[in-house]
Amino acid sequence: MHDASETLSALRVMRRSVDGLVTVLVDGTGAMIDLELEPDLSRTSVRHLEAAIVATASEAATEALRQRARILEQMQSSLSGT
């Protein structure tokens, strides 16, 4: 159980936007813990950048929660002996 707890604490998911302008890092709860933007955004509209941040963060959070659920299922299975 301690290993599962450590695994959950260490869980991180990184996603990069399709256009490569945005990189998001989330923790195991799906909370954004880092955001990187490409240095040259001069040709990018604010609306496009906003959409890229939201979409990329959403993808990362969805994956983090999927991985978290899998870890918790494994932990529950090992506790119940099945």
Image: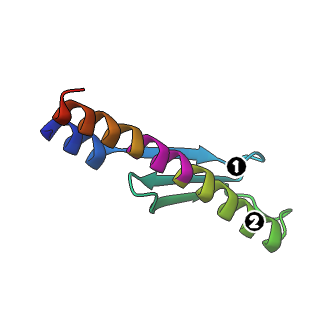
Residue depicted at x 21% and y 42%: 6
Residue depicted at x 39% and y 45%: 68
Identify the mark at residue 51; answer none if there is no mark. Answer: 2
Q: Is residue 10 magenta?
A: no
**Which residue is identified by label 1?**
17
Residue 33: image x %, image y %? 43, 60
* Nearest the eye: 72 or 2: 72
Is 66 left, or right, of 17 in this rendering?
Answer: left
Is 13 left, or right, of 6 in this rendering?
Answer: right
Q: Main secondary structure of the magenta part?
A: helix
The stretch in magenta equals: 62-68
Q: Secondary structure at mark 2?
A: helix
The answer to whether 76 is drawn above or below residue 57 in the figure is above
Amino acid of disc 1 = Ser
Residue 61: image x %, image y %? 52, 54
Tell me if mark 2 has few (under 14), some (14-19) or many (20+) residues whose alpha carbon lies within 10 angstroms of its own.
few
> For residue 57, which quarter of the picture?
bottom right
Distance of label 1 from label 2 (alpha carbons): 10 Å
Residue 48: image x %, image y %? 81, 65
- Which residue in the rendered view is the most extreme toward the left? 2
Identify the mark at residue 7; answer none if there is no mark. Answer: none
Residue depicted at x 29% and y 46%: 8
Residue 55 in sight: yes
Residue 37 in sight: no
Residue 60: image x %, image y %? 56, 50
Tell me if mark 1 has few (under 14), some (14-19) or many (20+) residues whose alpha carbon lies within 10 angstroms of its own.
some
